[in-house]
Image (cartoon, grey):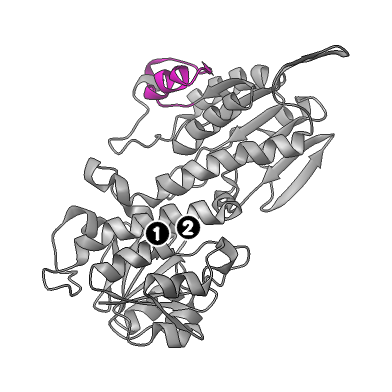
Amino acid sequence: MKISVLREKRAGETRVAATPETVKKLVAAGHTVTIESDAGKTAGFLDSAYEEAGASIAKDAASAAAGADIVFKVRGPEKDEVAILPDGSTVIAQMEPFALDPAVVSALNAKKIASLSMEFTPRITRAQSMDALSSQSNLAGYRAVIEGAQIYGRAMPMMMTAAGTIAPAKVFIMGVGVAGLQAIATARRLGAVVTATDVRPAAKEQVASLGAKFIAVEDDEFKAAETAGGYAKEMSKEYQAKQAELTASHITKQDIVITTALIPGRPAPVLVSEDMVKAMKPGSVIVDMAVTQGGNCPLSKADEIVDVGGVKVAGFSNLPARLPADSSSLYAKNLLAFLPLVTAENGSLNLDTDDEVVVAMLLTKGGETVNERIKS
């Protein structure tokens, strides 16, 4: 197959969908790889490195996409990008399926382009190596702590010096999925005193295993608050009120709060109210990782740091892009792991499969929208 990798066009997107390492493996598997010039530059991968790995370099996106069987991207194509894709080709990317522009869907179907969304990778054992949400969230959780520590402007660990003792920072992680667990581990490594909360019962043991303290209202609703797929359920108004009361008393003592709670296809739940923010100490920091879905704090704004009475509320819409080399490397490996599922024995593309992973990820095919989760 001919696999094309395009340079990302969205503002602030520094990642790339293939690295010289994965290109070498794709070429070894018999595929032809074309990279748009400078596609990996912002992630530290130069055209010369791709050429050494066996790829050819195209001067622009249209040249790179010409004749492609599969197009790899980090972010889903916008309408003008769909225009350069070959009719009947396949694009694999983080399509942001629940926020997908209907005009993009129409453009894909008009050209009978098949699209697969990496966000819809099922959370099953054999698909773990393909799970881009997890690989990117892991790095996002790490980076959120680094960003929070930088904004906080004080030392994270306890320091005992001849001039006096510096108390350790208190860090509160709200939402203990992949991002939250990495945030806990990172804050602990930096020497902070860490607490965490989540609505899923399984999170309690995970939090304790990382050396943090678990904070939650542990009632009957809490004990049943996890979907079969491992995601958090949306909690009742009554539970949210009880949890908010507990959080409000705890959050006033915290130096850094990192919120990570997301519900697929739904607005992010509000975890930190305006009153809670105003009750925090001046100099405290909130890092809202859910800002692109409305935010866990109503005061957060995408890619801004809002000062609320001395409390800094930071919203980062693309934390993985702040670690482009590692984020690209992991994402490229996710794509590499997935590719065999759509590759026939003779090396050609095969989307006519009942494989549960492919079926779950397929959005459009043959001019039709085939995924029930995004059908309007």
**What residue does disc 2 label?**
328
Quadrant of image for the N terminus: bottom left
Mark 2 residue crowding within 10 angstroms, few (<14) / some (14–19) / many (20+): many
Q: Is residue 25 left or right of residue 323?
A: left
> Residue 208 magenta-drawn?
yes
Position of residue 113 in the picture relative to residue 218 (left or right): left
Q: Residue at x 55, y 75 (%)?
A: 38
Tell me which segment is drawn in magenta.
198-221
Residue 108 visible within the image: yes
Query: Residue 160 or 261: which is nearer the viewer?
Result: 160
Circle 1 residues within 10 Å: few <14, some 14–19, many ≥20? many
Q: Position of residue 361 (x, y in %)?
A: 29, 59
Quarter of the rendering containing residue 24:
bottom left
Between 273 and 353, the one lying in front of the other is: 353
Q: Residue at x 36, y 62 (%)?
A: 22
Residue at mark 2 to residue at mark 1: CA–CA distance: 6 Å
Q: Give whichever of 331, 355 is nearer the camera.
A: 331
Taking 208 as reference, is 147 above or below it? below
Q: Position of residue 273 (x, y in %)?
A: 67, 33
SS class, disc 2: helix
Residue 300 drawn in magenta: no
Q: Residue at x 42, y 24 (%)?
A: 203
> To which residue does mark 1 refer?
332
The answer to whether 253 is drawn above or below residue 127 in the figure is above
Q: Is residue 79 above or below residue 321?
A: below
Rendering coords of residue 255 (x, y %): 72, 25
Q: Is residue 119 left or right of residue 31?
A: right
User: Quick check: can you spot residue 297?
Assistant: no
Amino acid under label 1?
Answer: Ala
